[in-house]
Every structure is written in structure tokens, then in C-alpha cells.
Amino acid sequence: MLSEEKSSSSSSSSFSSTLIVHLFVVGFHHKKGHQIEYSYPLLSEPHDDQWSNIASLALPDGAHNRDKDLIYFHIPSNTKQTLFGIAAYRQIDAHSLINKDADVTRNSIQKSVCLILRQPLYGNVSEELELITEKYFEGKDFNKTDLFQEFVDNINKNPPEFDLKYFSARDLVKQYRRKTLILFKLILLQKKVLFMLSPIENLVKTILTLVSLIPELICNGLNECTLIGEKSNIETLINLHENEDIVFDRNDEKQQIDFDNIKLKTIKIDEDDISTTSNDIQQEQEQDTTKTNIIKRATSITSKLTDTFNRLTTTPTTATTTTNTSNIILNYSVDLTHLDQFHFPIQLFNQNNLLHPYLSLNNLDLLNNSNVNSYVIGASNGLFRQQNNIDIIINDQDEDFLIQSTLLKSQLQLTTADLRFTQLFEDSDNGIKSEEEIRRLFLNYFLSLLAVAQTPNDEAMNDFNSTFVQSFQMTEAFRLWQLKGPYPHFDQIIPRHPQAGQLNVTDVKLRVSHVLDDTETGRKLKGAFEDTSQFMGEKSRAATKVLGQAKNSLFSSVIGTINHGKQWLAKPPQSPSEQE
């Protein structure tokens, strides 16, 4: 039930342009379910449609299993803009309350203090929100809500500025290692992606940190990330003529592309063709073999693999002439304060291309909306992963990403240059490099990719994975970014992979390591090797023990026979009368 507190008309009008739109206290009633118990400023009843799902988002699915959590979520506003929600959840023992309402019948109470913001200042505000939530719960009297009004007014008077320090790229790399680059490339393809991680704080921070690796995307590129409307025709957006082709006029003297004279050919997208193509892509079905068969296979090739590794580790590095990969980094520098010259952010999350760090079960139908082209969604309810139209699922209970099609698996396959690039995440002590360095690496990678996608050549495309580059070129985000050109300063960027170079012995080791560590088949094979080694070791020890026992038994038998012979020989000869 909403608080009876009244907001003056002047106070209501003052919130029309402030950072915080509303503060809510959301609780769970044993009969009514999720409900908004308090708001500042006061909401009118009945609630507007835009607030209808806030209670279920602020109290996430399975919240009763945790004492605290932090949730970030997005909702559309009536003005066709995205609003950004932060909820600090707590659960306490109901018997500890000083002033307990009569309808509190359960042993525990779950509540969230929730803020609705006009800007995605998640980390900046969440720290203060958690502090005020702790103070609210420590009071043990939920009727005392005076502290919230002062809290909201103070933030609105002195709003913080956006800061990337609340999104730790270093922690992301520490968690996913090489796979961080796979996730980065995945986001650029505008696919239907589902994250299922726990707790919710880890889920939302993982998603938003990944998104933050793309320049300017969080602070300036999420205004439409919750909007769903009729599918727009990309031809109308680009507004090109039927007979124009892609033409790159090259200045032979400078060997540079003249972006002023680029023309794009209209690309027609037939939904029937898309449906037919998707139906033709057969889903890869991997059948697990039994442990016995794997061990047999592993036993037969163990010696060969051992020989291969020995040759790799003993081959002199002088055998292959190549450039030191640690030094193959693009020979340009970009002033991070002037990225606006490239018209970033790239529009990955505009209308019908959704970003929801967290969705509750009430929003399950959104995944099957026919107008939605792509999404990146976080969820905690298992029913989400049962939907049929998801391209990939990232689940903390699975070692591998669950990729639904062989085509997407091919597009996300890391190349040799990609594997070299992931080695740059680590410093000389095999630790993760600094936050600033990790972001600089991903910026270089992203800018290089854009340069290659704009001026394609086979060698550069192969270094990024040609199927990935071709798919990226077909995304709505890349084509709209091209439309905003030309970019006069983009010729500073060399159209090649940051880690392009000749193949060498180290690359082979990287590939073998990647296969064994980062693929299901590789891990099974690696496990089989370990099982085989353990099995052979145990058999060897058992054989040694049996041989030892046999040796001791035989030795004892021989000694016994000898002693018996000695005793027989020591006896005096018997007379004939004694023998009778």
C-alpha cells in the first residue's frame, strides 16, 4: 500500500528533469505478492503502466535464498526513453522488528529500496543507495521513511558524473580469460543473448561491464534499449538508391581510402529468406562418449601428443622468422577524450535491439516478441533458458557457452591473431594487467575491427575471422554507423588486426592450450589423459606390489625347502631293525 504522504505540486514539478525520478520501497506480501509500499514523490493510483513491473524487478526471482543483493534493471518511459533502475535488496528476521505490522506472518521479511534514474549512473548511485538501505533496515521500523526524502533531494541537487571505474574490466578478464574476447565479439553481432549468473549483482555487473568495453555505449547509447515498436526498414533508414554499389575511391599516392566518395548498395532483407536460411542451419548435437572409450582413445594417442609437445618445447625460436607478438600493437594512439570524432557510440541497443541487465519472470514474453531483433538479457529463473529462439546462453553452471547454431560457433571462433591478443591481458608475472591497459587493448581491437570492416581485405578479415567480420558488416549497428560518416580522422587507424603477424611455434602452443582448456572436447580429452596417467600409475603400483608379494612368497618357499632339506640331512641314518 502506498504511503499517505502528499507531495506538493511544486515538488512534483521539480522532479521533471532531475536525475532521480522516484524512490520506491518494494516489499513482498504473503497474499498480494510484490507491491510498492512507499514512493517519493508520491505515485498516483492506479499506477502508470511503466511502473507495473518495478516490484518484480526490484525483488528478483529466488530472492528468499539470499540475505542481500543488488539489482540493475531498465524500463521504458512514457516519453520513449529508457529509465534506469537500481534496487538494494535485504532480508531480515521478522522477529527482530520493533514495530511489526499485523499482516507480517512469515519468519523473514524481504524488501528492496529502489531508485529510478534518468541516466545510467549505476555504480555512482548504488554505493549511496546501499548505505541508506542499511540504515533503513538497522532501524527495525519500516514506517520511518523520513530519511529517504532528504537522501533523494541531496542527490538531485548534486548529481554525480558518469565514471567507468564502477565497471571493472579487469575483474571481467579475470573471470573469463580468453573467453572475454568471445563475449566482446558476440555483443557486436546483435544476437539474442541470455546471461544466467548468480547472485544478481554478479549478473548485472558482468553484462554492463562487457557493454562498457564498447566506447561511449553505456553513457550515451542506451536511451532506446528498452523500446519495442514496429520493425523499421533499414533501406528507409539509410535512404539509398537502388543502383548504387559500394565504391571505395583510393588515392594511389597515399594508399588511403577516400571516405568522402563511399557509396553503399541497398540491401534488401526478405524475412522469408531469413527464415529459410535459419532453418537450413543444423544445430550441432554433440554426443558424450563413455569414460571407457575416451580413456581408450586417450591411451592410444598419449605418446603421440607427448612427442608433439616435446618437439614444440624444444624447437628453437630461430627456426621461424617472425615478429615478437608482444610488440605487434597498432602504431597509432587515439586521444580517448576525442572519441566523438568517430560518432560513437555504435547503436547496438536502439529500438527493437534490447538491453536488460535483469528481467523477472513477468517479462518472459519479451523474448518471443516478433518485433525484437536482438537482445542481451540477464535472468535468474530457469524458465528463460527453455525458450527456443535464444542464440547463446552464458550460465555460471556450465563451463562452455551454450551456442545454439554451428554458424554462430564458427563466427565466434578465435583466430590465431585473437589468441595472441588475449595473451596481452596478462603481465610478465601471469597476472591481469591494469584496468586502464585492458580498456586500451579493447579500444584498439574495436577500432581496428571497424577499419577492416570499412576497407575489407582477405588477409585482415581472416585475422579477425572472416565469417565474423562478414556478419558484423551486416548488422544494423555497423550500417547505421557507416551512415553517420564520413570520418576524416579514421585514416589514422591501420586496417589490420592489432596482433597480425606470421605464424610461429608459440601460436601452435596457444592453439593447443585453447583447445584443451576452453572447449568441452578438449577438456574431456585432457581429463582422459589425467585419468589414463592415474590409471597407469595405479596399475604400475599394483603390479609392483604383486611382484613383491610373489617374490617374497617364492623366497619364503625356497628358504623353507632348504631348511627342510637341512633338517632331513642332519638326521642320523636308521638301522635296519629301526626301519622295521
Image (spheres, grey):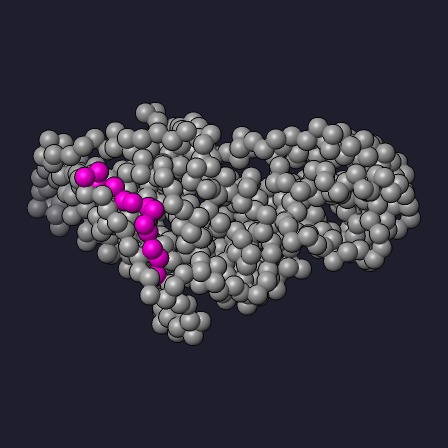
The answer, for residue 333, to whether it is visible in the render is yes
Residue 550 sits inside the magenta stretch: no
What secondary structure predominates along the stretch shown in magenta? strand
Tell me: 3 left or right of 289: right
Looking at the picture, tell me which residue is in the foreground, 351 or 105.
Answer: 351
Query: Could you tell me residue 180's position as x and y percent?
Result: 41, 42
Q: Residue at x 55, y 59 (%)?
A: 352
Q: In this view, does 407 lie above or below 70?
A: below
Looking at the picture, tell me which residue is in the foreground, 54 or 307.
Answer: 54
Q: Residue at x 82, y 49 (%)?
A: 43
Query: Could you tell me residue 49's position as x and y percent?
Result: 74, 58
What stretch of residues is rendered in magenta?
Answer: 253-265
Q: Which residue is drawn at 77% across and 40% down?
A: 15
Looking at the picture, tell me which residue is in the foreground, 31 or 84.
Answer: 84
Residue 259 sits inside the magenta stretch: yes
The answer, for residue 210, to whether it is visible in the render is no
Tell me: 204 left or right of 36: left
Q: In this view, does 499 lie above or below 107?
A: above
Query: Could you tell me residue 195's position as x and y percent?
Result: 52, 51
Query: Could you tell me residue 176's position as x and y percent?
Result: 43, 41
Q: Residue at x 60, y 50 (%)?
A: 358
Looking at the picture, tell me which residue is in the foreground, 8 or 135.
Answer: 8
Tell me: 273 left or right of 46: left
Q: How many labels does the image show?
A: 0
- Quarter of the figure with residue 154: top right
- Quarter of the figure with residue 191: bottom left
Tell me: 203 left or right of 57: left
